[in-house]
Amino acid sequence: MLIVVSIIILLIAATNIALYYSGILEIIKSSSYKSFFLLGLYLLQTVILILPLIILTKMRYKLRPRDFGFHKMSLRKSLLSAIEGYLLYIGITLVITIIVLNFDLRIPGYQLPERILPLFGNDIPSIVIAGIIVVAVAPVVEEIFFRGFLLRTLSNKIGLWAGSAITASVFALFHMQFASIIPIFILSLIINSLVIRNKSIYPAIYFHILNNAIAFVIEILLVFEVIKIESII
């Protein structure tokens, strides 16, 4: 199983590095259909993440949904757990931000995350496509892989602490936002703790949806100048 994990991580890394350094992303950015190209790239990334899990599930290990963390949990309890985790994340972020501002620190890897909409475009169809990917698809796909598969596999093999740290690191690197890699790493650790504490992947999915939805709405408000960037930093 660890061999499969390693192969998937290497495939993800190779794909992201190839996209980053090949100039393909720059070509896509200048295209009139960039939102559809980006949708295709995300679907490719999704296949790389999920296809090995399907093969494992159906052909070799006969895994069931519960083996990926889909344990029954009430919607109310799942949502409350997700909200508690999100408030913890906001609290930690605020404390670090206050320290950074008060002491005028410059921490590499601790900046605002890159904005998504400039990649897709500001027209309505592009915003809709971006919203579907960011708010609906990504949280489910990524949580199935990172928490339902990677965290559980690593934790069973090398222990909870090491498994959680490695999962959070891979999750942060996966997003290719190196300027904000520390907040993403912290966020991943909190999501890991939700899954470990509740023994279910549902709070992680709801947390991810909540976090992405709030960030996406704020970005839309910034794009249409309903709020100014100075008001949130």
Image: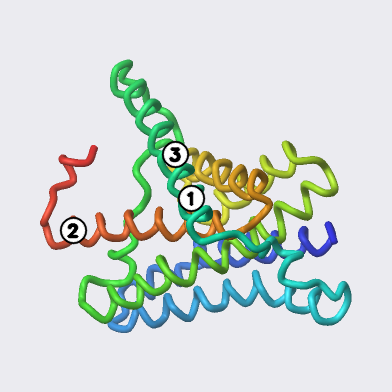
Q: Residue 111, located in which quarter of the rendered image?
A: top left
Q: Secondary structure at mark 2?
A: helix
- At label 1, which amino acid type do we have? Ala
Residue 232 in which image quadrant: top left
Q: Amino acid at mark 2?
A: Leu
**Quadrant hosting residue 7:** bottom right
Residue 130 is left or right of residue 185, and the answer is left
- N-term mark: 1 or 3: 1
> Which badge, 2 or 3, comes first in the chain's sequence?
3
Q: Amino acid at mark 3?
A: Tyr
Measured along the vertical axis of the image, is residue 144 above or below residue 87? below
Q: CA distance from mark 2 to mark 3?
A: 22 Å
- Callout in the foreground (2, 1): 1
Q: Residues within 10 Å of mark 1 (few under 14, many from 20)?
A: many
Q: Mark 1 sits on what residue? A: 82
Q: Is residue 128 left or right of residue 166?
A: left
In the picture as drawn, the residue positioned furthest to the left comes out as: 226
Q: Tell me if 88 is positioned left or right of 195 in this view.
A: left
The quarter of the rendered structure image containing the C terminus is top left
Q: Is residue 13 above or below residue 125?
A: above
- Name the residue beneath numbered marker 3: 89
Which residue corresponds to the image point at 46% horizontal and 49% vertical from the top-left? 80
For label 2, the residue is 221
